[in-house]
Amino acid sequence: MNANRLVDMRAFDAAPLVKEPFMHFVAHDFVPKSVMVDIDRDFPEVPKRGSFPMSELDSGPSFKALVEYLESEEVARKFSEKLGIDLVGKPTTMTIRGYSGEQDGRVHTDSRSKLVTVLLYLNSDWNPADGGLRLLNSDNLEDSFDEVIPAAGTLLAFVNTENAWHGHKPFVGQRRSIQLNWVVSDAAVRRSQWRHGLSAKIKRWFGGGKKAKPVDDAY
């Protein structure tokens, strides 16, 4: 599938870059509504809440093409230009979420091994009343300066700094997203793959309950 059809780079280019309190931008309809029909069909069957590596999932062709494009050098170059940070040639990690549970959404900042976090939400017919991911001034969920509704095609990207606080109110149900990270080293990739692979297995073994401790990317 042609990558130019999968995403709308005009929406990416038009998204305003916000520099304070941490650098980020939100691009609406980055995945056009016309493409979401294919993405909905080809989204992998995610068995439980939490984040799963692509290696643990089976998805259809349009979803695979989207993921492949997001990890391309072309996209790394676009994000580098937008954020003013060199990401070309940096290793990446990619995880998929399908569901959210009561224990998800806690306020946090990302692991220091991550340079940039990109969240691409893929929730068709999302009810805005359910709330979204809050971007925060501090570690207090009520101290927000913006809220990103996880509607289909919405992309959020932020530079990972010590004050890049974010979280959301508990939500139980389908909450689909792709998380892409550029990370500091291949060792960070291996650690992420090990953690997410182990977490995925635990969720399958124990049903995603209390024994399945979530990692730091509950979006």
Image: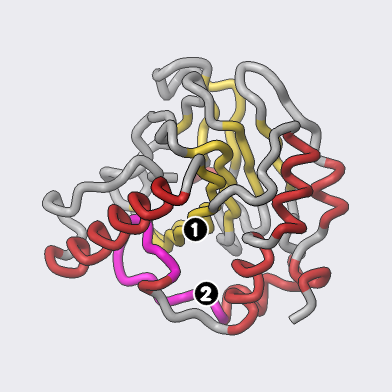
In the image, which residues are magenta? Answer: 42-54
Q: Position of residue 74 (x, y in %)?
A: 77, 58
Q: Is residue 59 left or right of residue 16?
A: left
Residue at 80% across / 39% down in the picture? 81
Q: Secondary structure at mark 1?
A: strand
Q: Is residue 45 above or below residue 112?
A: below
Q: Position of residue 158 (x, y in %)?
A: 61, 35
Residue 131 appears in the picture as rendered = no
Residue 217 appears in the picture as rendered = yes
Q: Is residue 55 left or right of residue 39?
A: left
Q: Is residue 46 within the magenta segment?
A: yes
Q: Which residue is mark 1?
A: 94
Q: Is residue 124 left or right of residue 88?
A: left
Name the one closer to the observer, 55 or 179.
55
Amino acid carrying label 1: it is Met
Name the one closer to the observer, 139 or 113.
113
Q: Is residue 124 left or right of residue 114?
A: right
**Corner quadrant of residue 167:** top left
Please tell me how crowded label 2 is: few (under 14), some (14-19), or many (20+) other residues with Cα within 10 Å: many
Q: Which residue is mark 2?
A: 43
Residue at 60% across / 67% down in the picture? 67
